[in-house]
Image (cartoon, helix red, strand yellow):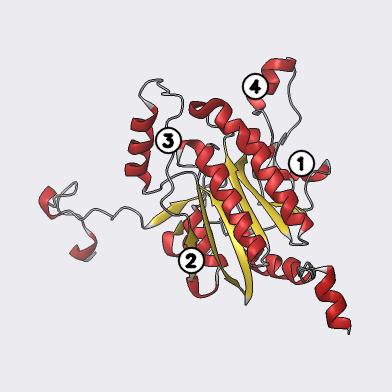
Amino acid sequence: MSSWFKRKEKGIVTPTEHKKETPDGLWYKCPECKTVATMVEHKRLLHTCANCCYHDRINAADYFEFLFDNHQYEELDADMRSADPLNFVDTKAYPQRVAATETATGLRDAVRTAHGQLNGLGLVVAAMDFKFIGGSMGSVVGEKIARAIDYARRNRLPFLMISRSGGARMMEAGFSLMQMAKTSAKLALLSEAGLPYISLLTDPTTGGVTASFAMLGDFNIAEPGALIGFAGPRVIKETIGKDLPKGFQSAEFVLEHGFLDFIVDRKELKQQLFELLTMLQPAPAKKPVAEAVAARR
């Protein structure tokens, strides 16, 4: 037998300094089905698994990138920051926690708002970021959503809300809870103006967000597998002392019980939104009575 096929020395003898490590960030392993894919392919599929369709959490910027035509959009109220109305302190002072989170994430708060074109249709989008204090709803979140709705009303544009939140921000107590009423009132004005509101619930959507603007859409839709509810499953189980049904509070469970209109794969989201918005084209603004009479003359 040729000496080519015989190992002359045992073990690997490459010096440590000559070994080449695989660079980080090249591969993605699905946490659900364990399928491995390249990060390039994973990003091409909008951070969903090609095998089981598991949807990874993505940021507001990622939604803006693939929803708005040519990745072009104008952000609204980008520099708005939280105050500290209660001088709140837990393991650290609230301003310190906000500053540390801003440094770690590059975000100003848990929601970003923007307007642009979706397949040629004007659209205002508010998208939440879970990595900013658990996507919690504080006064800035409520105010930015309210201002985005006002912008949609002024410019006769439909509004899309992408929710991902752990609920109210405890560091702002009552100021946080007030945002439930404020955003709901703004959405009522949007409805009176005849402008469409689509609510997209992603993983997770819980607490006061679910109890307010997330469930008030003309269409309430969700991504596959998203956790949707008010209190978390663990809290409910401990409260009632019973095991919960399989898949409890998943998007599929919520759809089956009538709280969603449909579930949409992220890869199909832009086209589905386009079809909905085309169907829900906003009605023209009503003219004052005197102007309408003059026009008829």
Element at label 1 = helix
User: How many numbered marks appear?
Assistant: 4
* Eye-nearest disc, 2 or 1: 2
Relative to the observer, which residue lies in front, 221 or 101?
101
* Eye-nearest disc, 4 or 2: 2
Question: Which mark, by number, is residue 277?
Answer: none
Question: x, y (%) of residue 137?
Answer: 55, 38
The residue that disc 2 covers is 74
Question: x, y (%) of residue 101?
Answer: 37, 39
- Do tag 4 and tag 3 residues touch (Cβ < 8 Å)? no
The residue that disc 1 covers is 254
Element at label 3 = loop
Between the residue at mark 2 and the residue at mark 1, the CA separation in whole angstroms equals 34 Å
Relative to the observer, which residue lies in front, 114 or 186?
186
Residue flagged by tag 4: what amino acid is it? Val
- Left or right of 267, for residue 2: left
Element at label 2 = strand
